[in-house]
Amino acid sequence: MIKLNYFNLIEFACPDCGANKMHKSFLKRFDLARKISDVPYIVTSGYRCKKRNKEVGGKKDSSHLIGVAADIKCETSYMRSRIIYGLIKAGFIRIGIGRNFIHADDDVAKAQEVTWLY
């Protein structure tokens, strides 16, 4: 059982099937990022089963499917700045920026040191 300071594991569970196959190393780094950011993180998507991933329009090779990704609700430029700062300082090198969310993943099978827009 992993101990997190800022999250409950249930926050990362798939809302369709209830499965939670998040990698411990991802969760530890994500928890550290939250500490560094010093702002609340509202997780809008963690682990996804194939059904859920399809429902939300996720890519077939989504990092959410293997438990190494999460999306964080983000509605202000201040929050965006703090979250991105924390993610980078914690060692995340794959970050996606959407209008109202930030995506972070630890997927070693994909391009590294990248930041993209949705």
Image: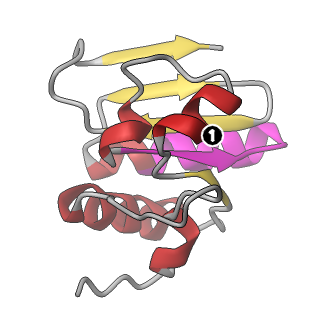
Figure check: 79 above or below 3: above
Find out whether residue 57 is within the magenta segment.
no
Q: What residue type is labelled 1?
A: Ser
Q: What stretch is highlighted in magenta?
A: 69-86
Identify the residue at image location x=62%, y=62%. Answer: 41
Query: Which residue is identified by label 1?
Result: 81
Task: Determine the secondary structure under disc 1.
Answer: helix
Find out whether residue 75 is within the magenta segment.
yes
Residue 45: x, y in percent? 60, 49
On the image, which quarter does residue 97 sit in? top right
Residue 85: x, y in percent? 48, 44
On the image, which quarter does residue 88 sit in? top left
Identify the residue at image location x=30%, y=87%. Answer: 3
Residue 5: x, y in percent? 41, 85
Front-lying residue, 97 or 14 = 14
31 sits to left or right of 16: left
